[in-house]
Image: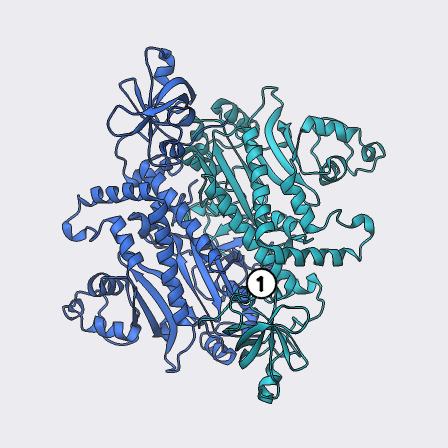
Chain colours: A blue, B cyan
Amino acid sequence: MNTNSIKDLLSGKQLLQEVTINGWVKTFRSNRFIALNDGSTIQNIQCVVDFEKLDENLLKQISTGAAIKVKGTLVESQGKGQSLEVQVSSLEVHGTADPETYPIQPKKHTLEFLREKAHLRVRTNTFSAVMRMRSALSFAVHQYFQQNGFFHVHTPIVTGSDAEGAGEIFKVSTLDSKNPPLTEDGDIDYSKDFFGKETNLTVSGQLEAETYAMGLGKVYTFGPTFRAENSNTSRHLAEFWMIEPEMAFYDLDANMDLAEDFIKSVLSYVLENCKDDLEFLEKRLLDEEKTKPVAERSEMPLIEKLKFITENNFKRVTYTEAIDILKNSKPNKKKKFKFPINEWGADLQSEHERFLVEKHFKCPVILFDYPAKIKAFYMRLNEDGKTVRAMDILFPGIGEIVGGSQREERLDVLLEKMKDLDIDEKELWWYTDLRKYGSAVHSGFGLGFERLVLFATGMGNIRDVIPFPRTPQNAEF
Amino acid sequence: MNTNSIKDLLSGKQLLQEVTINGWVKTFRSNRFIALNDGSTIQNIQCVVDFEKLDENLLKQISTGAAIKVKGTLVESQGKGQSLEVQVSSLEVHGTADPETYPIQPKKHTLEFLREKAHLRVRTNTFSAVMRMRSALSFAVHQYFQQNGFFHVHTPIVTGSDAEGAGEIFKVSTLDSKNPPLTEDGDIDYSKDFFGKETNLTVSGQLEAETYAMGLGKVYTFGPTFRAENSNTSRHLAEFWMIEPEMAFYDLDANMDLAEDFIKSVLSYVLENCKDDLEFLEKRLLDEEKTKPVAERSEMPLIEKLKFITENNFKRVTYTEAIDILKNSKPNKKKKFKFPINEWGADLQSEHERFLVEKHFKCPVILFDYPAKIKAFYMRLNEDGKTVRAMDILFPGIGEIVGGSQREERLDVLLEKMKDLDIDEKELWWYTDLRKYGSAVHSGFGLGFERLVLFATGMGNIRDVIPFPRTPQNAEF
């Protein structure tokens, strides 16, 4: 079954040679020109058949979506629109696609329609481009960390601790849900469950990753995380992939340096390696935005936007500075914010983040040193006693893409904080152990992978950048 | 916080320069020699302090496990056992590790003891070596596929279909388990659950990966999978990571070629990139096996064993040939097998697989063309009507490391098979769609990542090659 990928063929190295190609028919016109695609690239290869020599029954089977195998000679094309084509000498049909019922016809489908056909949508140009980009970004993540001395750690998916109190979690169980075993008090007897205790799906691998950073130095996780939030938005999924590096001996400044360098590096990777897909996606976005009012269109075409990120420094601003800017901003004074900014301590909403990034600074922004009260228990308290060494990276159009912090490495301060927040010390004995034995300054951050893919592909809905999205009321396929 | 990793320092490029190192004390002897490790390598760097110049209180804090920062000059070592050392000019303690309570003292700990301390065990030589190897293998997997034209696909973790009937699954829910909503019939009303239906953790991403192979051509998944089997063995985990490539237009032969090339390639990667860790693990294994009877020891040292795999062809044998060999084998005739082999059709047990690999062929074996009755519904039926295009790769000491097949691409044959096995066609409408529209020969396989790590590190228990193992009655951390 030795065949040539269309990507390889289009490089032209096999010009005038006999080639064998397997792929799916994109279009077939004039009983003569087959545009064939095999998924290796967004480009089709034109296959020219001599219909007078082909069996009529075979000819009938060649329609959009059919899988075929062609043999022929790779030659320079006489026609417009492509430089190379295959003069077909033989053709076989692997499998047909009845035009009456096959949903992916060569016409414009809405993204909503294609979500219902998530098992077939990767056969469209848009989704094949998005998913090749997703794959490239995923590899770029691994390559960046491995080349920079990080070790990949697989933190657990099923966990017994909801110590973070992140709230909306999915329970995992093998108990008979209709007739669960009960304790004498009438409670469910989780000692009889598979793991001998209540368990749930992880909301973050950070705490476990910290244990590994305190031995291997620099580590990262890249795995699925779960939130059972009933949010039906274009930016939330119940199941999403998260990248979480964790570094011993890194303070917040080093953490910010890393996050910025990391994002620039993975975006540079796709600019370099996914040119065809990016060009297609850029054109797609431009076409789509033509139907929108000018004010809602992107300020830059897709590729320019990515280059803008890789070529400019992120602006670093303290929370306190940001509050001043927001307090004195036009939309605040004119009461245009849904949540007006009146005082220091307010939690920033998406509208504020977008104002800072898109209107005020017009570049990615790293906000840091947030009020302790609006941030997680494990973030390091500053000397002022009221702010913590937290940082969020805000991106145009996306909002928060990274959330991170220097971690509280002082046992007494951490325990005090946990007590204040009613976090059970016994549940997190292993986490506090890290502060008892060989504790040190350390930091880390989390980046939601789908938000990165969303940004890099210019897509508008997070459900369109993951193969089979999980959202409230939806776990199809 | 710009510091040097010990791995970089030991390359010697900064000889005679001032360096700053952060790390954890492995040992401290004669009040003078600190063996310091930062996780970047299994090697420690010797830091020489002048105790007469150091504060006595500081000196007391330097014990195994303490995190410290040293500055000094990198020089050639006068002593034995290392080529370079650091003449320390200043020393700071980040965090102490009280020798009275710190569990990871410089002495031999059992692997069982360390499993109870899974949050600290990566600070030992054995586990740091294993986890660096795991990280390298994980990267080698991604690199292999990406360099060979595959796209990484993230198949869903929470799924609504247990169509495979793999059986032992974990349920995922947000319903109140004590008082779940009920339907009029008194059943649990899953329409009120988060996803609006019963959901569980995936047992395999294969079926979803197939949908992507039929658009992108060659894809792979690498994600967590789950089995709620009550198996307390050294080879089973309830949560493990699986690699599943899936390729359009690949028949079984091409599938076997790929699997063999893939395994050889990732093992070559660690032979090339993890020399120090492999040497350590080889020595560890030799030491451990000294306590065992000769017959139970490995036939080859670790590195030789890995090279044997990368340098030799896997033996390809049909199931039918294997049954003949087993029927006529000494252990079968002498009734030494727990499950005697009497006739064609028998399912092979671990004892049979090990006999074939370790005694008969003495090399990795690919068994193929299994009886249809003992294999999954989606495997392609051979023309004989009784065998399927399945293949398993068997490894010495590990048993089955890969299971794969050519997939049934013919709609009628697939539907017939599903009917026979009572698999609901409505549940798998999207899977059968792949056979309706542009169907083609395709194949794939699954490789349990932890079994690969087990093999490559020479460890004996699968719980020791994943950071936080999940097994019956155990979801700690």
- A123 shown above or below B52: above
Tell me, yes or no, if residue A437 can be seen here.
no
- A379 shown above or below B206: below
The percent coordinates of residue B279 (x first, y second) are 66, 56
Name the image quarter holding residue A186: bottom right
Q: Is residue B133 left or right of residue A81?
A: right
Q: Quarter of the image containing the C terminus of chain A?
A: top left
The percent coordinates of residue B332 (x first, y second) are 81, 33
The one nearer the camera, B276 or A361, is: B276
Residue visible at 78% across and 29% down? B327
Q: Secondary structure at mark 1?
A: loop
The one nearer the camera, A327 or A367, is: A367
Name the image quarter holding residue B132: bottom right
Circle 1 residue: B41
The amino acid pointed to by label 1 is Thr
- A322 shown above or below A272: below
The one nearer the camera, A9 or A45, is: A9
Residue visible at 28% across and 76% down? A344
Residue visible at 20% across and 53% down? A299
Q: Chain of mark 1?
A: B
Q: Is residue B85 left or right of residue A395?
A: right
The percent coordinates of residue B299 (x first, y second) are 76, 46
Circle 1: is it few (<14), some (14-19), or many (20+) Cα within 10 Å? many
